[in-house]
Image (cartoon, coloured by chain):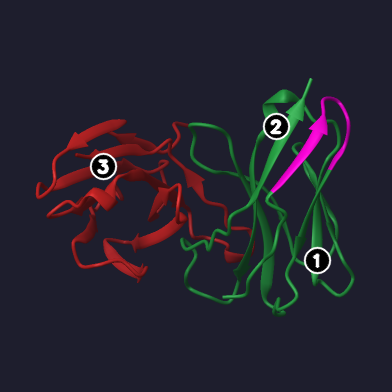
Chain colours: A red, B green
Amino acid sequence: KAGVTQTPRYLIKTRGQQVTLSCSPISGHRSVSWYQQTPGQGLQFLFEYFSETQRNKGNFPGRFSGRQFSNSRSEMNVSTLELGDSALYLCASSSDLDRRNEKLFFGSGTQLSVL
Amino acid sequence: DAKTTQPNSMESNEEEPVHLPCNHSTISGTDYIHWYRQLPSQGPEYVIHGLTSNVNNRMASLAIAEDRKSSTLILHRATLRDAAVYYCILRDVGSSNTGKLIFGQGTTLQVKP
């Protein structure tokens, strides 16, 4: 079974641009979550999608948005990029079948550098 | 969300056991204790989780205190490949936030040959 796939692996953008990151979850998984990881703030939850609906949202500005498609693939978008948006963006998927034994499976992330 | 406290860093020698502690004094009755680890240049990976009883799997063991206010992740024989940041996380099984994990700073484990 293929793991969580994130593309692209690396991305360089300039301030003011926008960026779209992609995540393909493990086959059969319906929940997709996004996280931002920076040296200063660590791993922070961005949002979660389930069955094409945003189920939960972290404390990030509206420039950060996402969506999920009917095949559970997800994209996140960051508009009007700022230098502080430079980070590793991680996607995780889960089956959401048994909350007591739920595990998240993470991709390797997209390293975004904003110049 | 209940908070966890872990030491910033620990060192171990290769092939020796490692005990990684975690304090969670405000844990609630529906919180499960989860451990994830993040190897360099990778996303976090699930290690183990439990509610009240000690748990074992092929990667590690989880020892949970009787009052559940603390737990210990045990790596029985550390290898160089176990060098990673280990995160202790509480997950409320009653919550619909299945995809949301609250990560602390974790413990950076260094394994010496």
B45 and A88: which is toward the camera: A88
Task: Inspect the image, locate mark 1, and give the three-letter code of the amino acid beneath it.
Answer: Ser
**How far apart, in angstroms, are the residues tagged by discs 2 and 1?**
22 Å
Label at residue B51: none
Task: Inspect the image, locate mark 2, and give the three-letter code of the amino acid beneath it.
Answer: Asp
**Dot 2 alpha-carbon crowd within 10 angstroms: few under 14, some 14 to 19, many 20 or more:** some
Is label 2 on the same chain as label 3?
no
Instruction: Look at 22% across and 60% down and name the residue there.
Output: A65
The location of residue B31, given as percent across then percent down, is: 67, 72
Q: Which structural element holds mark 1?
A: strand
Say whether disc 2 or disc 1 marks the residue closer to the N-terminus. 1
Residue that badge 2 annotates = B82
Residue that badge 1 annotates = B70
Quadrant where the N terminus of chain B is found in the figure: bottom right
Label at residue A22: 3
For this view, does A7 lie left or right of residue A16?
right
**The magenta stretch spans residue B50:** no
A54 and A2: which is toward the camera: A54
For this view, does A37 lie left or right of residue B23?
left
Q: Which residues are magenta?
A: B9-18
